[in-house]
């Protein structure tokens, strides 16, 4: 309770839906096992947190909801201390923020294996196999601008800007503008010019791209505003940015007691990808839908849970 209070977390509450099984069927080893699911406090994390709760409920677990924890450090601490039992985390965050490495590993599988092995050895945390969903950095442009200039990759952007340096107007976050794994590093890797760099908060960057304040902007590759504002993600074809594939993470002692959790969660993880999450995020951040209902409807649409939820 002391850790729970210090993190600013509220008491666990029951999952706000009645859940019936679909392709995720009751698992005898999980019947009435209490599992507290946590998440960080942004849309994507809240969505996948609800997905985990619905999946585990369908499997028969007694699930407690502790989604919407403020900050990565608090979420990590809650998992380590047992205030939550399971959460979703990103391989790049684990490798750089939690394990303290400065150099990311470009290959998704190799990055996953490295963080999986080290976090288990050092901290007793089990990373389940990673999803295709990779919430990393990229540059975004409007779909119209991309089509006009034939832009699909960051190398395409570089070639275009080398010929048209007056178009090299970028919107980025303040920190991204100076970090070596941000604008300076990616610019050195690709060799594109910058005529003007404008700094904004994250949300303002998406609007800035859409309204022509800048031609290119720093974005996150699974953000719902990509679909909502009709933006195109330029592929990081030289793989400069760290990989941020999402994984279910739980303490090893819980995994050893209930390895069935993996068979319940893996179909959900494997069904997620960037395109799916962009559309789900759009429903919340652009259309204003409730994230719990969006997650539930997605789980029903995939057949993971029954349609007669209430």
Image: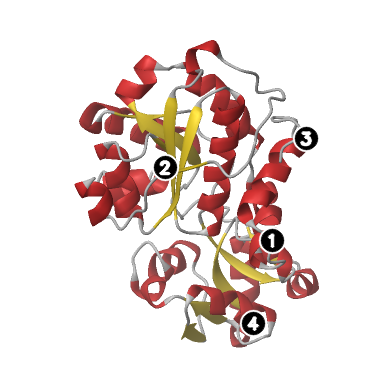
Name the residue tied to disc 1: 289
Answer with the quarter of the image where residue 176 lies.
Answer: bottom left
- Where is residue 207 drawn, in percent x and y? 63, 79
In screen coordinates, is 234 left or right of 239?
right
> Which residue shows up at 25% across the image and 53% down it?
5
Q: Is residue 23 above or below residue 43?
A: above
From the viewer's side, name the closer residue of 88 and 2. Answer: 2
Name the residue tied to disc 2: 91
CB-based contact (under 8 Å), mark 4 and mark 1: no
Name the residue tied to disc 3: 307
In primary-sequence order, the first of circles 4 and 2 is 2
CB-based contact (under 8 Å), mark 4 and mark 2: no
In primary-sequence order, the first of circles 1 and 2 is 2
Name the residue tied to disc 4: 164
Secondary structure, mark 1, is loop
In screen coordinates, is 297 left or right of 48?
right
Alpha carbon distance from label 4 to label 1: 41 Å
């Amino acid at each position: 309770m002391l850790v729970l209070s210090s993190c600013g977390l509220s008491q666990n509450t029951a999952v706000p839906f009645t859940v019936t099984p679909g392709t995720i069927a009751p698992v005898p080893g999980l019947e009435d096992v209490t599992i507290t699911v946590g998440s960080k406090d942004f849309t994507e994390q809240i969505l996948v947190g609800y997905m985990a709760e619905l999946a585990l409920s369908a499997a028969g677990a007694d699930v407690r909801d502790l989604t919407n924890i403020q900050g990565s450090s608090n979420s990590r601490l809650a998992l380590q201390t047992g205030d939550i039992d399971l959460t979703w985390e990103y391989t790049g965050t684990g490798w750089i923020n939690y394990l303290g490495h400065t150099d990311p590993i470009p290959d998704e599988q190799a990055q996953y294996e490295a963080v999986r092995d080290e976090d288990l050895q050092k901290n007793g945390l089990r990373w389940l196999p990673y999803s295709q969903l990779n919430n990393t950095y990229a540059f975004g442009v409007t779909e119209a601008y991309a089509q006009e200039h034939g832009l699909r990759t960051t190398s395409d952007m570089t070639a275009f800007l080398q010929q048209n340096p007056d178009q090299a107007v970028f919107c980025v976050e303040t920190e991204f503008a100076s970090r070596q794994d941000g604008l300076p590093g990616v610019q050195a890797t690709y060799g594109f010019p910058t005529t003007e760099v404008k700094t904004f908060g994250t949300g303002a960057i998406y609007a800035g791209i859409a309204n022509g304040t800048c031609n290119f902007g720093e974005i996150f590759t699974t953000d719902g505003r990509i679909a909502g504002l009709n933006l195109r993600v330029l592929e990081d074809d030289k793989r400069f940015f760290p990989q941020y594939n999402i994984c279910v993470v739980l303490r090893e002692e819980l995994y050893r007691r209930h390895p069935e959790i993996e068979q319940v969660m893996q179909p959900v993880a494997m069904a997620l990808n960037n395109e799916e999450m962009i559309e789900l995020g759009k429903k919340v951040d652009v259309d204003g839908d409730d994230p719990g209902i969006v997650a539930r409807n997605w789980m029903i649409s995939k057949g993971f849970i029954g349609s007669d939820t209430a």
